Image (cartoon, rainbow, N blue to C red):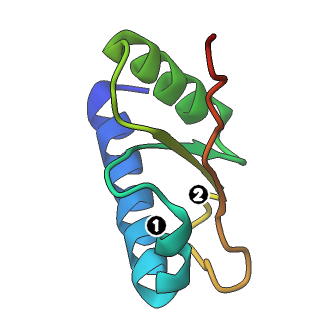
Amino acid sequence: MTDDQMFERNLNLQTAFMQYLLEHPDILDRLPDDFRLVILPDDDPELGQRNLELLGRQGESDKPLVIARMRTCQPLDLKMRPPQVFVPVTAAVG
C-alpha cells in the first residue's frame, strides 16, 4: 500500500466516522473534548497496522487517544455495523 492509498483509505474512514458522530451526538458526550483518533479497520489488517505504526511514530501526546474499530467495505454502512469506539483508560502513576 502506498502512502497515497493509505491517506485515501483513512480519509474515507474518518469522513464516515465523523458523519456517524454527527448522526449520534450522544457518543460525543462520552469522548474527551480534544483527542487523537486512530481507526483500526476490522477487515483491513494492513491499514490497521500502518495506523498503529503511525501512532507510534507520533510519540507522546497530552491528548487522549480514541480508538474506533470499523469495517472498510464500500459502501460503508455504519447503520448496519456501527463503529466500536474505545477510550483507553490511562493508569495513574503514584
Where, by quadrant of the figure, is residue 83 drawn?
bottom right
Residue that carries the numbered disc 1 in the rendered image? 17
Residue 1, horizontal then vertical, whole percent: 44, 27
Would residue 60 be found to the left or right of residue 73 on screen? left
Task: Report the front residue among 3 and 61.
Answer: 61
Callout 2 environment at 10 Å: few (<14), some (14 to 19), or many (20+)? some
Give the total number of marks visible in the rendering.
2
Task: Indicate the amino acid at tag 2.
Answer: Thr
Where, by quadrant of the figure, is residue 36 drawn?
top left
Task: Report the front residue among 19 and 43.
Answer: 19
At 53% across and 34% down in the image, what residue appears? Answer: 47
Residue 67, placed above or below residue 78 = above
Residue 84, horizontal then vertical, whole percent: 69, 60
Callout 1 environment at 10 Å: few (<14), some (14 to 19), or many (20+)? many
Q: Could you tell me which secondary element the residue under label 1 belongs to?
A: helix
Would residue 17 be found to the left or right of residue 74 on screen? left
Q: Could you tell me which secondary element the residue under label 2 belongs to?
A: loop
Residue 23, horizontal then vertical, whole percent: 47, 89
At 35% across and 58% down in the image, what residue appears? Answer: 33
At 50% across and 73% down in the image, what residue appears? Answer: 29
Residue 64, horizontal then vertical, whole percent: 44, 38
Foreground mark, 2 or 1, reads 1
Identify the residue at the far left of this view.
4
Task: Indicate the amino acid at tag 1.
Answer: Phe
Q: Quadrant of the C terminus?
A: top right
Q: Are marks 2 and 1 in contact (CB under 8 Å)?
A: no
On residue 5, which mark appears?
A: none
Residue that carries the numbered disc 2 in the rendered image? 72
Residue 71, placed above or below residue 76 = above
Which badge, 2 or 1, comes first in the chain's sequence? Answer: 1
Mark 2 → mark 1, Cα distance in angstroms: 11 Å
At 65% across and 37% down in the image, what residue appears? Answer: 89
